[in-house]
Amino acid sequence: MSSKISACSVAVGFEPLSPLLSKVDLTLEAGKILVVLGPNGCGKSTLIKALAGRSLPMSGRVCLDSDGASLTDIDPRTLAREVAYVAQSIVFPPHLSLREFVALGRNPHQQWFNFYQSSKDKEIIQSAIDRTNLSHLADHRVASLSGGEKQRAQLALALAQTTRFIILDEPTANLDYRHQLELICILHQLKSEGLGICVVLHDLNLSLQLADTVVLLAKGGIYAHGASSEVLTEQNLQDVFGVQLVRLHDDKYQGFVPAAVI
């Protein structure tokens, strides 16, 4: 059975007669990284919430796997074992330690009202904390952490869910350069382990390092969709963002430098 999340003619938004995005068709495949780009307010976050089953599309369907099961027909506990979602920001429980917060990721795999952690649960929780370089903060209150540490704590919780798909909304926000690079390494490792990953980003240069496929949103729908080399062209980015960009590259590195506002 093919492992994927598919959006079929999806419309998302808040006003019934004026959706932010319409006629969206895309697929998130296992073992691939899909990067979603677009200007502020174009509907990136709203779209990926629908891909994660966190909100209902206004029309169309979001389906899991080749049998076409709609996310809206999957019970929340089962869905949480399949798809993890990392939001831009959340309200952190004031009295939980980081370890207790990450342990919430194991809830979909446990019996309701049973807070017992098996040795496997404890191993997975510790591994998630270690992979996000938060071991030294494991016993600190999660609400007291810095913005970047909280961002990594959310990722650790998602890793503890042990899902097939992880969907992340601007996970590099509040991260310094070191932790951005560490996040890229983690996502590449997860991809090599067979996970399907969808990421909303604003940084074009990080997108070049991460993406197997890029979706560029603009004007109420998908402006371009394909390999990063095909989508992230100077002309496409100028049309969508209204900024002239110069693409620089050599044998090892490539990136964009803003040149002028159009």
Image (cartoon, helix red, strand yellow):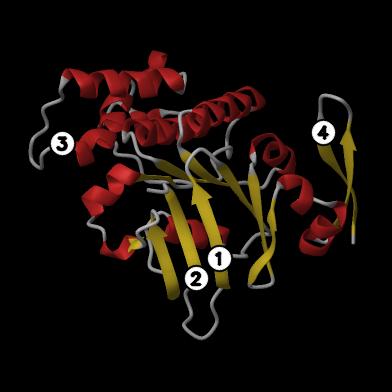
Please say whether residue 134 is visible from this viewpoint: no
Q: Look at the numbered disc 3 and give the secondary structure of its residue.
A: loop
Please say whether residue 52 is visible from this viewpoint: yes
Q: Indicate the amino acid at tag 1.
A: Asp
- The disc at residue 110 is 3
| Local crowd size for mark 1, using a 10 Å CA cut-off: few (<14), some (14–19), many (≥20) | some
Name the residue rendered at 81%, 28% in the picture.
Answer: 253
Q: Residue 165, position in %: x, y? A: 42, 43
State which quarter of the image contains the C terminus. bottom right
Q: Look at the numbered disc 2 and give the secondary structure of its residue.
A: strand
Q: Which residue lies under the disc numbered 2?
A: 10
Say which label, 2 or 3, has the lower sequence index: 2
| Local crowd size for mark 2, using a 10 Å CA cut-off: few (<14), some (14–19), many (≥20) | many
Label 2 vs label 1, nearer the camera: 1
Say which label, 1 or 3, has the lower sequence index: 1
Q: Which residue lies under the disc numbered 4?
A: 254
Q: CA distance from mark 3 to mark 4?
A: 45 Å
Q: Look at the numbered disc 4 and give the secondary structure of its residue.
A: strand
Q: Indicate the amino acid at tag 4.
A: Gln
Say which label, 4 or 2, has the lower sequence index: 2
Task: Report the side of 70 relative to 165 (left or right).
Answer: left
Q: Is residue 9 above or below residue 205?
A: below
Name the residue rendered at 68%, 41% in the picture.
Answer: 207
Task: Report the side of 102 relative to 87 (left or right).
Answer: left
Say whether marks 2 and 1 touch (CB < 8 Å): yes
Say which label, 2 or 1, has the lower sequence index: 2
Q: CA distance from mark 4 to mark 2?
A: 33 Å
- The disc at residue 25 is 1
Q: Indicate the amino acid at tag 3.
A: Gln
Q: Indicate the amino acid at tag 2.
A: Val
